[in-house]
Image (cartoon, rainbow, N blue to C red):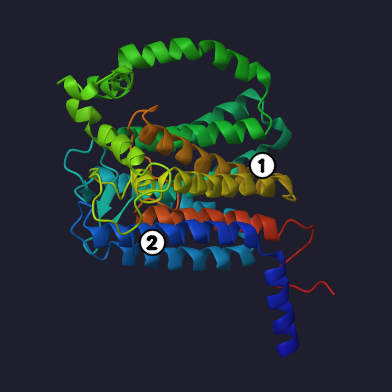
């Protein structure tokens, strides 16, 4: 009995994607350190001194879930789509009820629900449900992806969660859903007969979006990017405030930074959330920023590499979905911090404060690790074929 347990544990660690797991734990651990520094230095606007403890707790919960998921066959997860698919949608729809919660009163979106003892962002778990259900949908369709009826059904599958998020007012997360849909479709073999018309129609779609759909405050978020000195223009002062101070904070660390426990920092509103990268720049300078970006790039590329060794289309689709989610999160977050993209409220994976985001990201990593562990034909972590 002991020998069998030892063999099972050995097989588990042999097939564990140790590089990916260690990388995300290092980045998440760094996030906890940043939260502790924010609280100790009084830089954050939040009054909750337990912020870093909650981040550490969510790190531990997420890491444990990822380790457990890596030992289980991802096919078993996707077969339960009828449970977590409607469940995630229902949870997201609760944001349209009296349970809705806005962490910042001036926020444009209503993407949180108040559970009494804590708050929850359902869209984070809707992303997981979408990746798994859409990956399953694509694998069922197989080489008949480009059949018109299949295309219609797949587009409806992608449009439902995206439009719900748009109705919430969470433009950043809606973009994430769209990018996941587009990348997974492309990787599954979308024909150029669909891609080319979309490319041709793109300028017209952008024009319609700008002139007919976007609200004035949404347009200002783009227009402010082209202002040489937005803080001198009353029209852009409120829109540009966080991004303006964020860039000052980012550059104030220069090459080596001020350290995690210095005497003075540039104040950036809600820095612990979407603008946490500016605090990295203050504390650790340009070199620290490069180090963090390198680690996040490694995580994204490792996920993409795992998709290449998946034993079937389902596993590959899951990895592509997780990769596209992580990648667009990084691009949008770093882009708005650097002032080349509008501020749309997208957190930096494993770094920004947020229990829902931390746990959901680890669940996604668990899915990828499951694909990696079961990449061999007829392999089971806790099953000895001999």
Q: Residue furthest bottom?
A: 1
Instruction: Name the quadrant containing residue 93.
Output: top left
Give the mark, 1 or 2, whose residue is nearer the N terminus. Answer: 2
Q: Residue at x 35, y 43 (%)?
A: 278
Residue 110 picture location, percent across and down: 25, 41
Q: Secondary structure at mark 1?
A: helix
Judging depth in this view, the residue of 314 and 335 nearest the camera is 335
Callout in the foreground (1, 2): 2
Q: Alpha carbon of mark 1 to alpha carbon of mark 2: how far?
A: 41 Å
Judging depth in this view, the residue of 293 and 117 nearest the camera is 293
Q: Is residue 353 visible?
A: yes
Q: Residue at x 56, y 68 (%)?
A: 68
* Horizontal side of residue 373 vs 353, given as left or right: right
Residue 276 picture location, percent across and down: 35, 47
Judging depth in this view, the residue of 124 and 95 nearest the camera is 124
Q: How many marks can you see? A: 2
From the image, tell me which residue sits under label 1. 140
Query: Which of the numbered marks, if any, corresponds to residue 32?
Result: 2
Q: Residue at x 52, y 47 (%)?
A: 296
Residue 198 picture location, percent across and down: 55, 16
Q: Image height check: is 75 above or below 147?
A: below
Q: Is residue 136 visible?
A: no
* Horizontal side of residue 131 vs 34, given as left or right: right
Q: Residue at x 55, y 27 (%)?
A: 152
Location of the N terminus (image quadrant):
bottom right
Q: Image height check: is 269 above or below 263?
A: above
């Amino acid at each position: 009995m002991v020998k069998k347990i030892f063999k099972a544990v050995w097989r588990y660690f042999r097939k564990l994607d140790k590089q990916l797991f260690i990388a995300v734990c290092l980045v998440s651990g760094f996030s906890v350190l940043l939260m502790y520094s924010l609280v100790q230095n009084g830089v954050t606007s939040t009054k909750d001194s337990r912020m870093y403890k909650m981040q550490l707790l969510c790190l531990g919960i997420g890491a444990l879930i990822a380790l457990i998921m890596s030992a289980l066959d991802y096919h078993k997860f996707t077969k339960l789509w009828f449970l977590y698919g409607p469940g995630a949608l229902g949870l997201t729809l609760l944001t349209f009820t009296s349970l809705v919660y806005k962490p910042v009163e001036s926020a444009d979106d209503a993407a949180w629900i108040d559970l009494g003892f804590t708050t929850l962002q359902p869209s984070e778990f809707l992303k997981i449900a979408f990746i798994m259900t859409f990956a399953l949908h694509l694998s069922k369709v197989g080489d008949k992806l480009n059949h018109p009826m299949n295309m219609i059904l797949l587009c409806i599958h992608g449009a439902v969660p995206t439009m719900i998020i748009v109705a919430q007012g969470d433009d950043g997360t809606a973009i994430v859903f769209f990018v996941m849909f587009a990348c997974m479709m492309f990787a599954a073999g979308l024909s150029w007969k669909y891609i080319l018309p979309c490319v041709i129609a793109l300028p017209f779609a952008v024009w319609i979006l700008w002139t007919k759909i976007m609200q004035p405050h949404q347009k200002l978020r783009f227009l402010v990017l082209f202002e040489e000195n937005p803080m001198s223009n009353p029209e852009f002062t409120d829109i540009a405030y966080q991004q303006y101070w964020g860039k000052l904070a980012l550059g104030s660390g220069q090459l080596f930074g001020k350290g995690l426990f210095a005497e003075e920092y540039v104040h950036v509103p809600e820095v612990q959330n979407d603008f946490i990268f500016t605090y990295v720049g203050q504390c650790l300078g340009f070199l620290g920023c490069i180090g963090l970006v390198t680690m996040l790039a490694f995580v994204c590329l490792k996920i993409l590499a795992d998709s290449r060794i998946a034993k079937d289309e389902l596993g590959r689709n899951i990895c592509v979905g997780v990769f596209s989610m992580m990648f667009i999160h990084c691009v949008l977050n770093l882009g708005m911090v650097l002032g080349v993209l509008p501020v749309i409220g997208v957190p930096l994976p494993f770094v920004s404060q947020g229990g829902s985001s931390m746990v959901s990201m680890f669940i996604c990593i668990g899915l990828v690790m499951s694909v990696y562990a079961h990449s061999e034909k007829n392999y089971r972590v806790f099953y000895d074929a001999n």
